[in-house]
């Protein structure tokens, strides 16, 4: 028994030694053969990025300040210099009453006024019908007033021919001699040209000829004198021409509203309302500067028929707003 116990102890010691040797060998392999010493890894703080301050953004001076005055660009095709004293007086009056810096100027073309409005260089402009439509379409401005002229807020034209001519529709104008007041007549040429295009007649190539008669009544007289076969004039122009019973109206054209006053959409509502209230107190002054008899509140629906005709004729309002 004693001998057996000693044998068992020897076997147990041998096993323990074998295990110890294996552990030492494994540790040497894991540590690179025992040549490297394992030390504690000290944590290092992660550096935080430091913010670099940006240069301050430029701020636009508030509307109505010396650096950014409220600008009114009003169109009058007569001599602008003759309005210089009125412009200066109105600028001073509007500035004093509003507490804003207001500059009134008279420009010669509607295209110039429209460009100033849509670029932010003007806050209020006057505009003829086509410039108005372009401004609304481009969301540059909204109508405030419309001009009254001779008790009317719009003008209108008509497409006419002479009884006995085989012309019964606007499309039937193709191939015939056409008379107009002149090339710049809104109701005697520009809007009639829209109607012709709508009816698939090219006013530049499909008419036999185009003659400038000099005025609306002259167009009627030219028809009566057989100088042309068809034409366009102001609505009812034949009433002022003797013996005009043979004139036949083929189509009454849509009304063309008079000049309007527009205000920019780029100002906040509070500033817009302040300017509108100011203008409301000086409508007579504004009317005089644009050559109108008076101003009344504008209504966009007054442009619906003209807008529809231009759409049917595939005419862009911006191209007509010069």
Image: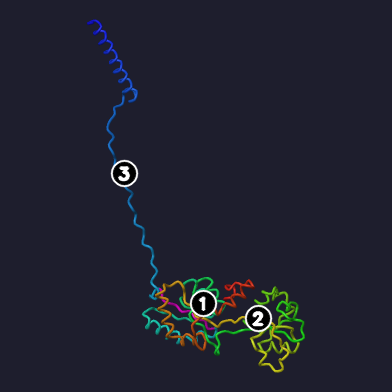
Which image quadrant: the N terminus? top left
Q: Work out whether mark 3 precedes mark 2 in sequence or the reverse, and give the earlier one.
A: 3
**Most extreme residue toward the front, as rendered?**
1
Q: Is mark 1 on a helix, strand or loop?
A: helix
Residue sitting farthest toward the left: 2
Camera-nearest residue between 250 and 155: 250
| Picture quadrant of residue 58 | bottom left
Comparing marks 1 and 2, which lies closer to the viewer? 2
Q: Which residue is drawn at 74% across and 83% down?
A: 229
Image: 7 above or below 160: above
> Where residue 250 sits: x, y (%)?
69, 82
Using residue 134 as the reference point, say whether residue 37 is left or right of it.
left
Say which residue appears at 63% left-offset and 73% top-offset. Answer: 312
Q: Name the residue under label 1.
A: 113
Q: Which of 80 and 249 is in front in this view?
A: 249
**C-alpha separation, residue under disc 3 versus residue under disc 2:** 79 Å
Q: Is the magenta stretch mostly helix, strand or loop?
A: strand
> How dense is the environment of label 2, judged by Cα within 10 Å: few (below 14), some, or many (20 and up)?
many
Residue where numbered disc 3 is placed: 46
For label 3, the crowd category at 10 Å Cα-Cα, with few meaning under 14, some 14 to 19 and many 20 or more, is: few
**Percent position (x, y) of residue 118?**
50, 72
Give the percent coordinates (x, y) of residue 257.
56, 82
Quarter of the image where one finds residue 24: top left
Please provide the residue range marked out in magenta: 68-76
Asked whether residue 290 is drawn in magenta, I would say no
Q: How many numbered marks have been drawn onto this rendered protein structure?
A: 3
Residue at image point 48% right, 80% down: 144
Q: Name the residue under label 2.
A: 189
């Amino acid at each position: 028994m004693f001998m057996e116990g000693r044998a068992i102890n020897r076997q147990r010691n041998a096993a323990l030694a074998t295990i110890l040797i294996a552990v030492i060998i494994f540790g040497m392999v894991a540590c690179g053969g025992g040549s490297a010493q394992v030390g504690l890894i000290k944590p290092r703080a992660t550096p935080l990025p430091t913010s670099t301050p940006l240069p301050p953004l430029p701020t636009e001076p508030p509307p109505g300040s010396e650096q950014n005055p409220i600008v009114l660009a009003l169109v009058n095709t007569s001599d602008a210099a003759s309005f210089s004293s009125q412009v200066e007086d109105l600028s001073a009056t509007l500035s004093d009453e509003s507490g804003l810096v207001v500059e009134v100027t008279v420009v010669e073309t509607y295209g110039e006024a429209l460009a100033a409005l849509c670029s932010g260089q003007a806050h209020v402009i006057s505009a003829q019908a086509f410039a108005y439509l372009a401004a609304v379409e481009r969301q540059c401005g909204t109508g405030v007033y419309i001009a009254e002229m001779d008790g009317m807020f719009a003008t209108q034209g008509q497409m006419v021919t002479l009884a006995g001519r085989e012309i019964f529709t606007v499309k039937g104008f193709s191939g015939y001699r056409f008379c107009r007041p002149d090339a710049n007549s809104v109701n005697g040429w520009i809007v009639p040209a829209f109607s012709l295009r709508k009816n698939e007649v090219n006013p530049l190539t499909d008419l036999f000829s185009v003659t400038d008669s000099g005025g609306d009544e002259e167009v009627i007289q030219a028809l009566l004198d057989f100088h042309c076969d068809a034409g366009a004039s102001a609505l009812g122009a034949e009433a002022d021409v003797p013996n005009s019973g043979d004139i036949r109206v083929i189509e009454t054209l849509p009304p063309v509203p008079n000049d309007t006053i527009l205000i920019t959409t780029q100002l906040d509502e509070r500033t817009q309302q302040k300017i509108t209230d100011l203008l409301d107190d000086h409508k007579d002054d504004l009317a005089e500067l644009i050559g109108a008899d008076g101003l009344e509140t504008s209504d966009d629906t007054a442009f619906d028929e003209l807008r529809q005709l231009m759409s049917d004729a595939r005419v862009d309002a911006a191209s007509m707003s010069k």
